[in-house]
Amino acid sequence: MSSSDECKLYDCSTSLLNVTAPSGFTVAQRRWRIAYIRIYSSRVMLSLADKIISQRATQLPSMTSQQFDHYVAEFDHKINQKRLVKTVKEKDLVSLNHLGGVDGVVDALCTNSEHGIRDDEQEVIKRQEMFGFNKYHKPPPKGLLYFVLEAFKDTTILVLLVCAALSLGFGIKEHGAEEGWYEGGSIFVAVFLVIVVSALSNFRQETQFDKLSKISNNIKVEVVRSGRRQQISIFDLVAGDVVFLKIGDQIPADGLFLDGHSLQVDESSMTGESDHVEVDACRNPFLSSGSKVVDGYARMLVVSVGMDTAWGEMMSSITSDKNERTPLQARLDKLTSSIGKVGLVVAFLVLAVLLIRYFTGNTKDDNGQTEYRGSETDVDDILNAVVRIIAAAVTIVVVAIPEGLPLAVTLTLAYSMKRMMADQAMVRKLSACETMGSATIICTDKTGTLTLNQMKATQFWLGQESVEEDLAKKIAPSVLELFYQGVGLKEFSGSPTEKAILSWGVLGLDMNIEKLKQQYSILHVETFNSEKKRSGVSVQKKADEMVHIHWKGAAEMIVAMCSQYYESNGTIRSMNEDGRDRIETIIQSMAASSLRCIAFAHKQVLKGETEDGDDQSRKTNRGIKEDGLTLLGIVGLKDPCRPGVKKAVQACQSAGVSIKMITGDNMFTAKAIATECGILGPDYQQGSGEVVEGIEFRNYAPDERMEKVEKIRVMARSSPFDKLLMVQCLKQKGHVVAVTGDGTNDAPALKEADIGLSMGIQGTEVAKESSDIVILDDNFSSVATVLRWGRCVYNNIQKFIQFQLTVNVAALVINFIAAVSAGEVPLTTVQLLWVNLIMDTLGALALATDRPTNELMEKPPVGRTEPLITNIMWRNLLAQALYQIAILLILQFRGESIVNVPETVKDTLIFNTFVLCQVFNEFNARKLEKQNVFEGILKNRLFLGIIGVTIVLQVVMVEFLKKFADTEQLKLWQWGVCILLAAFSWPIAWFVKLIPVSNTPFFSYLKRLRIIYTIVKRPINHQKP
């Protein structure tokens, strides 16, 4: 820094100091300006220090092996590392005392319990080399070869391999080795392509999951280094670090309790015991990696990391199977299997019919002679004929198996996961992608999801008097001092509510936190959680023996604990019924203005009277007195709704998805926010059952609860148990339920729900682990986006199923009719494999990459019982399949005379027309219901590119691969005929979509017929003697 720059900095500081002169500024404003100067100056000094350190670091050589050995010797001289690791892992209190207790371990690890280790890269590297990294050994990721071998286990692949072997053998037998390998070899090539594409897709999916896993496992941990609190990655944690823990945190390593209040941890992930474990400095100072903080807060000394922890050992032995089969994939596997079975039945029928036709003398050879003439027929001719018949049956099986169907699902899910990440949603479980599309109800939190979670104090009532300006002057000093204690004396978790209250205390009440902490010592703390909805602290002034108990939290709950209240002049009034009613009316009016009401209460006792409750409560320092309190005042905090949340709620409601808001706020605040967000409409009436409190819902009889649960739109003053209970009731009613949650206590509801949505910013690690999808920006609009993507996934897969089944039905029927009637198949195995494999693979890619559209949010939700193939899909695919069957059979039986071409050219025309029909039908498949199939097509360049590639490959197949594909070159006018016939599928699709269809599933009619048949059959059986 130049001298001129230093002068400017000095001048700036001087002018700021001049600003703090008494003229025109309040005491609070002057204090804030002084604080600003201190912060500004300290930042300048720190930046200069960092610059000097970095310059020195570049000049210093890295640690030599001799220096490192000396460093290790220094640690070993003070402590035996293995002994220390074992002591903490086995929770051996006796061994810990032999090591000098927690203080002895702090000294041995060359750290400081207040300031932590040195914030220096060299220091961190030394400790990592000495004590290890905070990572566990993962099983090696599955390679490409693993997925190739897995693909060979697929029944479809095995059937195709058998068909390929038979076809290859029969082909060489009939046509010789030079040309006989075409069909069998092409099936082998097709199988190879299916395996490679499937293996590559699954391998890519595995890699993507590993990346997501690294992101989700990279938890931020708050530590202190060189006296400065900072957030670091859990992987950068080292032995000797001092970590801050609060409710909802996952303990990042094995360590020891330094200090804190009311710390309870859940060690069920390690021990299987569901009881919460109390942790303190005397009886149980041990903290295990992988455990969850369920109450209280603390500072922890990291002792062992990574593989030296029990959690690391356990996790390294677990292999997580990321290739889970989603419900939709399981249904598609069943569908593929069913289609394959139909193909086998048809193939056996064809085999039987053709054999019967041959051996009864109903088939003729190329010269018009009867092929089978009994004993006169040569054995070789019989074998060749049988081989040809079996090859035709094999072709039928190949046609029936939809190879592209599993691939389409994998591509769709992988594509949507990647896109959802860009739309602020990280998918942790693959099944959530598709399940979200079926959601019928979303249960959402209020704070931070529907609102901005940016609290600001806007109202203040002291007793029954509203105080708006100059609070410090209007409130008696004795009462003001009590407010200072209640607001400023606590370990702050950094929640928006606490920040808003602290800001109000400093700005509105002229509170000096540093001075306050010097005058008082904190005795006990009860931390806030969503069940208690309040927090408490007992403090003692260092100058006397008096203990002050303070409670703050949900206003109506705190008021219920009070029997008196303060007035602004310091007078204490008894809270009679009238006074209590007036205060409750004040709370209701504040809540109706969308304010969160926080009340403060106080009680003064002698030191020996601080604890309340039984012996166990006193032992655990969790019994702060709750009765006979005096109300200090009520603060109203405003948390504005997020921009766009009303639009997102309306979008979900118009999509047939009901939104239920579950909040811990009181009923009036909840109603005001719900109305502002559009959850409660203008038609809401008091007493309609749409708004209830958690305790009311909890106390319903089971039948009454089931009857009323669907009507409820808002549940106020709810506990996590109430949320869980609502989810269970809704699922019993047949709904697909999505739930948002951010707290540790939300974990049961998140796990119980069909789709658990945790919050990425405010959410605790426990909540994230229990969820299926993490909403990275905590915004309800992102929840609506996830709903759109879920529907898009389901819709894209349905599009492809319609497209795929049209191909299969048409090809199967054409080959079956031709084989039975004429004794030969018009479409060869190579041609059918080209249609089935290349068309389906490229078709899957084209139809799987359509992005969500607004029309998806105009349909009702699919729900649990909706069939995968709807009546609309049956209508579309049957119309297209019948048209294709009709024109191809006409070409098969009358093509030579109509088009005036030889038989070989006719067969090529049939093949070319069939493929082009699929190209045109791919456009039809883009929209299942809308007549305009070209809407938004220019935005999907991938689709247009794939169509172009398909056409080019078809031209190559027809014009250049004549022997391999068994085709003949076509003239331009013949190409024109094929294109014209295929293009008719567009107007057919347009007219067919005008035909209305029933909502009753197609196959339900067959079930009804079966039931009717059973009912009719019973009396007939009874009448028999």
Image (cartoon, rainbow, N blue to C red):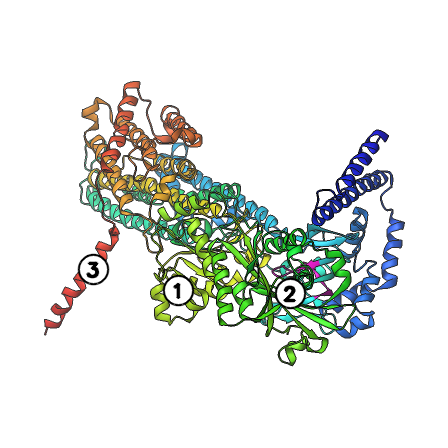
From what the image shows, is residue 920 above or below residue 480?
Answer: above
Q: Name the residue under label 3.
A: 1010
Q: Mark 2 points at which residue?
A: 570
Q: Earlier in the sequence, mark 1 or mark 2?
A: 2
Q: Picture coordinates of residue 645 (x, y %)? A: 46, 46
What's the magenta region?
Answer: 244-260
As helix, strand or loop, the secondary structure at mark 2 comes to: loop
| One can see residue 409 in this view | no
The verdict on residue 252 being magenta is: yes
Amino acid type, callout 2 = Gly
How far apart are labels 1 and 3 at the CA level?
A: 34 Å
Q: Would residue 254 be found to the left or right of residue 971 on screen?
A: right
As helix, strand or loop, the secondary structure at mark 3 comes to: helix
Q: Would residue 911 be found to the left or right of residue 764 on screen?
A: left
| One can see residue 8 in this view | yes
Q: Which of marks 1 and 3 is nearer the N terminus?
A: 1
Q: Would residue 260 be found to the left or right of residue 64 on screen?
A: left
Q: Picture coordinates of residue 458 (x, y %)? A: 56, 51
Q: Would residue 961 be found to the left or right of residue 89 on screen?
A: left
From what the image shows, is residue 172 above or below residue 650?
Answer: above
The verdict on residue 407 being magenta is: no
Residue located at (66% from left, 58% from top): 492
| Mark 1 surroundings within 10 Å by alpha-carbon count, few (fewer than 14), some (14 through 19), many (20 or more) | some
Q: Picture coordinates of residue 448 (x, y %)? A: 53, 51
| Mark 2 surroundings within 10 Å by alpha-carbon count, few (fewer than 14), some (14 through 19), many (20 or more) | some
How far apart are labels 1 and 2 at the CA level?
A: 50 Å
- Given residues 981 and 657, the one toward you in this image is 657
Amino acid type, callout 3 = Arg
Q: Would you say the residues marked 1 and 2 are in contact, meaning their CB atoms lie under 8 Å apart?
A: no
- Given residues 567 and 174, the one toward you in this image is 567
Q: Picture coordinates of residue 209 (x, y %)? A: 55, 48
Q: Residue 729 carries which label?
A: 1
